Amino acid sequence: MLIRNTLQPTDIGRIILLHSEYYSATEGYDHTFEAYVAEPLAQFALRTNPRERIWIAESNNQIVGVICICDAGNNVAQLRWYIVHSSLQGTGLGKRLLISAIEFCSLHNYLRIQLWTAKGLDSAKAMYLRNGFSLVAEKTHVIWGAERTEQCYEKPIA
């Protein structure tokens, strides 16, 4: 398994596809979720900020995991696009990606990490809680084809 920190041709489309295939199959998300992933991912790809980094896990020339840290301003890191292919969930890859992202935030003197996720993603929630994140906000609205509750988790960086 290769984990790299640079985007290569086709990566943006493959990252969007990985998210879309997974969440449409498991959560019933519609096509608007692809746009939700695509727009900020494209913006990230155009920036060069040393306080931002992406980790792309690749196996057999397929993207099988992703996590990214974006600079949200005010020394807050935003964790984005965190996903592990369903065939590799439970193997430790997700933990490895998350720990790498947290360590990166510490090295770059962020005060806290923030992420938004959807309520009901219990294995992700458990991973966040095990790694020091706490639920700080919720909002319910129509998004990705249905009424859903989004949740914000934060982790202070010591």
Image: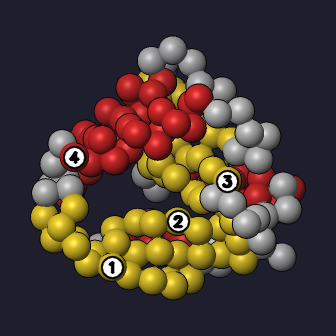
Horizontal arrangement in the rendering, residue 54 relative to residue 119 (left or right): right
| Mark 4 lies on residue | 32
Q: CA distance from mark 3 to mark 4?
A: 24 Å
- Label 4 vs 2, first from the N-terminus: 4
Amino acid at circle 2:
Leu
Mark 4: which secondary structure?
Answer: helix
Q: CA distance from mark 3 to mark 2?
A: 12 Å
Mark 4–mark 2 distance (CA, rounded to whole Å): 19 Å
Name the residue tied to disc 3. 71
Is the residue 34 above or below the residue 92 in the image?
above
Question: Is there CB contact under 8 Å for labels 3 and 4?
Answer: no
Q: Position of residue 105 (x, y in %)?
A: 76, 58
- Mark 3 lies on a secondary structure that is strand
Q: Residues within 10 Å of mark 2 (few under 14, many from 20)?
A: some
**The C terminus, quarter of image:** bottom right
What amino acid is labelled 1 in the image? Lys
Question: Disc 4 to disc 1, how far (Cα)?
Answer: 18 Å
Q: CA distance from mark 1 to mark 2?
A: 13 Å
Residues at discs 3 and 2 in contact (Cβ within 8 Å)? no
Vertical order, 1 against 65 (above or below) = above
Question: Would residue 85 be visible to someone looking at this image?
Answer: no
Task: Give the amino acid at mark 3.
Answer: Asp
Of badges 4 and 2, the one in the foreground is 4
Dot label at residue 115: 2
Where residue 56 appears, as percent x and y from the top left, is: 57, 35
